[in-house]
Image (cartoon, rainbow, N blue to C red):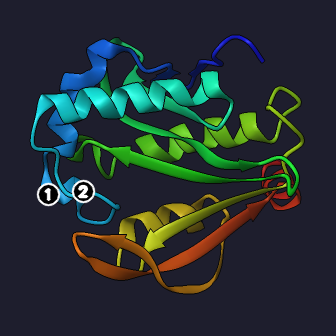
Amino acid sequence: MNEFPSHKTERLLLREFRPTDAQAVFDSFSQEVVTKYINRGPLQSLKEAEKLVEIRASLFGRGIGIRWAITLRENPDSVIGSCGFYKMDKGNRSVETGYDLHSAFWRQGFMTEALTAVINFAYSDQFFFYLNRIQALTYVEHRASIGLLLKLGFQEEGLRREAGYWENQYHDLRSFSLLRRDWKIQNE
């Protein structure tokens, strides 16, 4: 796959990250409410956001993951969040997913819409390799993320004790997975 695979949904455009997205990423990730359940504290500077955008944009070219910038279709230059895959394990045919959304866009179904599009892509013939399993980890008490995963058909596998470390402390994480066959069955 040489060209970055963009996706359009009813309300969204999922596209490649651009350097000009740094301000929107900073606006989102400088909010404690957004970073509360992820492995980083709030961003303190635009320079940090520029580095995060650079890292996300480089995943595809390096063949180690893919992260889409989520935008509204009517405003494709303004990023409202992101989603994608990393820890791509071709041998075991698995990936891990991650996602984030600016708090102004919470509880409107945007992440469900975005993840549905990228999961469809992941379980298609266009993905990097034949994929069987998508896994996700979430903070134990992150009810919105857990609800999203369950809504998409992920199954909880259990607790990973002290599997996360940020802000100078260990965190237990809940583990979820979605198998190709389960996704196909629920979307037939």
> Foreground: 60 or 182?
60
Image quarter where the N terminus lies is: top right
> Foreground: 18 or 99?
18
Q: CA distance from mark 2 to mark 1?
A: 5 Å
Q: Quadrant of residue 6?
A: top right
- Residue 160 visible to the viewer: yes
Amino acid carrying label 1: it is: Glu
171 w.r.t. 17: above or below = below
Residue at the spot of label 1: 32
Identity of the residue drawn at 34% across and 81% down: 170
54 w.r.t. 39: above or below = above
Few, some or many residues within 10 Å of mark 1 (<14, 14–19, 20+): few
Whether label 2 touches label 1, CB < 8 Å: yes
Amino acid carrying label 2: it is: Thr
Q: Is residue 110 left or right of residue 28?
A: right
Residue at the spot of label 2: 35
Q: Is residue 72 left or right of residue 36?
A: right
Identity of the residue drawn at 45% across and 48% down: 99
Identity of the residue drawn at 23% across and 54% down: 34
- Residue 77 visible to the viewer: no
Q: Identify the disc placed on residue 183.
A: none
Residue at the left extreme of this rendering: 44
